[in-house]
Amino acid sequence: MSIEIQGINKFFDNFQALHDINLTIPEGQLTALLGPSGSGKTTLLRIIAGLETPEQGRIGFSGKDVTNLHVRDRRVGFVFQHYALFRHMTVAENVAFGLNVLPRKERPGKPEIRKRVDGLLEMVQLGHLADRYPAQLSGGQKQRIALARAMAMRPEILLLDEPFGALDAKVRKDLRRWLRNLHDELHFTSVFVTHDQEEALELSDQVVVMSNGRIEQVDSPLELYGRPDSRFVFEFLGQVNVLSGRIRDGVMRQGDAWIRLPEGCENDDAQLYLRPHEVRLAQAASDQSHLPFRIEAINLIGAEVRIELKPDGWDCEELWEVGISHTEFNARQPQRGDRCFAIPEVGHLFCEHDTEPKTLEWKRR
Amino acid sequence: MKTRKHRRVGDSPLVRRTLIGLAVTLTVLLLFMPLVLIFVQAFTEGWAGYVSNILDEYTLHAIGLTLVVALLTVPLNLVFGVFLAWLVTRFRFPGRKLLATLIDIPFAVSPVVAGLLFLLLYGSNGWVGQWLGEYDIQLMFSWPGIVMVTVFVTCPFVARELIPLMQQQGREEEEAGVVLGASGWQLFRRVTLPNIRWALLYGVILTNARAVGEFGAVSVVSGNIRGETNTLPLQVELLYQDYNTAGAFAASSLLAGIALITLVVKAIVEWRQSRN
């Protein structure tokens, strides 16, 4: 089932939580609503479920208008951030709840319910916990039971609110993979809310980035990371190095730092955004750029050596970060305080008088 | 090697012994002795005397009336309290905080004043009472009046127990239930009620204890008609004023007995609540 969201406005008293949201969530895909806290992502998820009512706009499921359909009749699966398991029911009773409250005519018989619950618990690999109470489970187990409970009604749409937010790193990683597999197997349409960029990029087919109640960008993880539409998306998704300066005659300059830009850049105030992997480190400046730094810190842990750089003779708000391979690090043995130069390879230029960012490339010589 | 006993700050033996001694003395003098004395006085004429005092026509009637009042008041306030707690904790509307405060009025107002207010409003000269009088309905100085003031005096108990609990538990479980397709009634019966049952029972016990023992408000509206509008607490006073000490204490022993049972049940419920 696809989800169509048209012109949604939502207010809490005088605060506008969502501004004119238009979005289509394609059938069978895993979509992430990504944003900082207060960006309206959870509100949007609750509106899709029917737990909140928007002041304006319409929600459709595969073309059918469900705006005025009660939560109870929307038949979506919903996994709450803090699981919301029924504390006085056993795990099996929790999972069976949706089936037990069906009208008598539609309700399967007791043995059938038992069988379906067993099947669901098998699916989340927790069959041995059927008679436990929620208080006796770990966070990861509660999360999987909450999922099994949501799946019991065989929903075509599964909504998850910060599904891995309250779990520790290891469990989070396992559950993420497990959810991805489950999704690939059953092909329901899922939407999950997260504030964790890595989680959104790793897990989803489509990412919706939100801030201040507005949608910033909707794209595949690859496009989103490679070609962000706005400064917000750029800064929100991973580490970024920024050079702010003024463009005059094809050269961007600030203090001792300058970069020769490819042709077609107007004179303007601008900011150049570069990802850590889009920058090389060198002992000397090139004829294309002059970006002097002092090495501030070296972090050896991980697949790459991360080097933090402090501008030398110019300014930036946050330190730059560049990754080099361990082999290169061992060959050159850079030390804290060493002077070095950053050589840009790819950059994204945001001009003051231009809404669209420009992606620039410099040839290696 | 000499071992030293570990002591916390303020834990000096002198302070501890003084405090324990004081607490025990006060409890015995002010709480335990009077309770024992009730039963001693009740049995001054022996077992047979006690039984005949209890089986006194008017005392029996007072027992019956008290039970009727409690039987009507408790279910009424049970429903009302749940409704009120649900309203205050699950909905947002203007005046919600004010309503939560107004619930406490019966606690703040002296029961005698409450009784007088009802008399003013529903008595034969009162605003509502005059209008009802035209239809030959008399509420004051008869059992409906007694039930009305008792309901008033005891109505905060259930809501007061439920509101903090329901606030703390939040509405997430109910939302989970409704997403899974439960109707309003199913939600209440299968999700809300099981979560609040111990607090609810606790509220009911308190309501019952107060409904049985209420004196001030009831004495204003009952009219003290022997064998008609006398509840057990009023009967105790009446017997005492008639210099029938043994009879008064026999009746009192029943109230004391109910109080003791209430305490035991309350302790059990509290224990269950802390275990959940």
Image (tube, coloured by chain):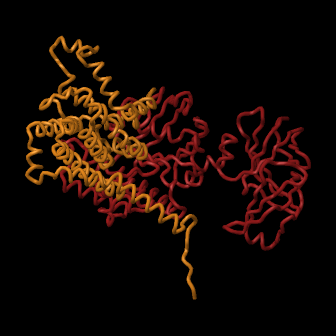
Chain colours: A red, B orange
In-front residue for pair B217/B201: B217
Q: Is residue A88 visible?
A: no
- Quadrant of the snapshot with the C terminus of chain B: bottom left
Q: Is residue A310 left or right of residue A3?
A: right
Q: Nearer the viewer, residue A12 or B87?
A: B87
- Position of residue B132 in the picture relative to residue A145 (left or right): left
Q: Give the image location of residue A254, x and y in percent.
A: 88, 45
Image-based side of A100 in relation to B53, left or right: right
Q: Quadrant of residue B12?
A: bottom right
Q: How many marks?
A: 0
* Residue most extreme to the bottom: B1
Residue beneath the point at 41% across and 39% down: A49
Instruction: Name the residue: 54% across, 77% down.
Output: B5
Question: Relative to residue A227, is residue B225 depicted above or below?
Answer: above
Q: Is residue A148 left or right of residue A193?
A: left
Which of the 4 image quarters holds residue A128? bottom left
Q: Quadrant of the N terminus of chain B?
A: bottom right
Q: Nearer the viewer, residue A362 or A97?
A: A97
Name the one closer to the observer, A262 or B31. B31
Q: Position of residue A212 (x, y in %)?
A: 61, 36
